[in-house]
Image (cartoon, grey):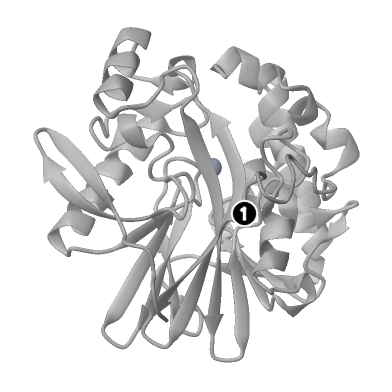
Amino acid sequence: MDRRQFLATAPLAGLAATGASVPAFAQSGSAATGQVPAVQRVAIGDVTVTCLNDGSLHIGPDALIGIDAAGYEELMREHFRDPETFPSAVNAFAIQSGDETILVDAGTADAMGPSLGKLPQNLSAAGIDPASVTKLLATHLHPDHVAGALSDGGAMFPNAELVVHETERDFWSDEGNFSGAGEMVQNFAALARNVLSAYGDRIVTFSGEEEVAPGVTSMPLPGHTPGHSGFMVASGDSQLLIWADIVHVTPIQFARPDVAIGFDADPEQAVATRQQILDRVVADRMTVAGSHIGFPGVVNVAAEGDGYRMVPAEWTYTL
Ligand SMILES: [Zn+2]
């Protein structure tokens, strides 16, 4: 899907009017041929992180800034990927820390079409009841991260605080920021406001690096949106940085971190932030988890040439 097609996606255009709701699980194939639940657990010290997939979407070259179709195709082929269909994952992460069940992002519900909206069934497969979620940490308020926080216009997670960067809340709350914006951005903003109002007095904001839950520290990573943030999970000697939308298209942006995406609120700042955090992740040999890195989305990163390469984590055989 290129940017024009993405902009024209009907469910997205209708999103402001309807508010998101959870789609019924469309069963594809028989029990023996349909895909199995997309759930993987990793241990970070005493904390368990459950990687959960919501589906995938294709982000073509027209949606990117700083690379043309030929450059895109070349990098895709170099990584053995099909430039016409390469799926960027949409992931969320549950964190079991002490008595808390914390969810980082909430998927798309029915806001972005049938290739997405699978988080509820994967949460269920992971044994996580939405009512048990104590905190929903929002990396930012784009629909692929928070449309699933709504169910029939109300809160999908009835007992959860919504934790979000105060700049992010303020940015989307101010309708004046979008007066000249196109329909898609208007819809993004309307959805963000719906989410904020559904959680009402259960919204908790942070503004810098703060412990937002036991063992979980916010890390502002501005650019993609003004309050775009990662979350560092740390326990004992282990840590995992959930870096949200630092990379949207893995075969492209690890090799070419200077490539931005049309959805970046500030593409220049997004590129600078990506470069900074990639350097830090390489220097500190950090493990990262990404919203749009192929499921389960957990990788290490090495420097390579003028850019970087990702090294997927091994399957977790024992916890
Ligand atoms: Zn995203």
Q: What element carries label 1?
A: loop
Q: Give x and y (percent) for residue 134.
A: 68, 79
Give the position of the C terminus as an image quadrant. Answer: bottom left
Residue 82: quadrant of the picture: top left
The residue under label 1 is which amino acid type? Val
The residue at 49%/50% (across/down) is 291
Compared to residue 281, the image places residue 79 above or below, namely above
Q: Is residue 31 left or right of residue 252?
A: right
Kindly tell me whether residue 175 is visible in this rendering.
Answer: no
Furthest residue toward left: 305
**Ligand 1 is in which quadrant of the figure?**
top right
Q: Where is residue 259 in the image (x, y as percent from the top left)?
A: 32, 27
What residue is rendered at 49% in x and 36% in y? 88
Residue with the mark numbered 1:
36
Is 145 situated above or below 198? above
Q: Which residue is drawn at 13% across and 45% down?
A: 303
Q: Can residue 202 be seen in this view?
A: yes
Farthest bottom residue in view: 98
Q: Return the residue found at the far front.
A: 32
Query: Quick one: 177 or 239, which is closer to the camera?
Result: 239
Residue at 57% from the left image edge and 19% from the top image edge: 1
Horizontally, residue 254 falls left or right of residue 319, namely left
Horizontal and vertical percent position of residue 282: 17, 55
In this rendering, would 243 be left or right of 312?
Answer: right
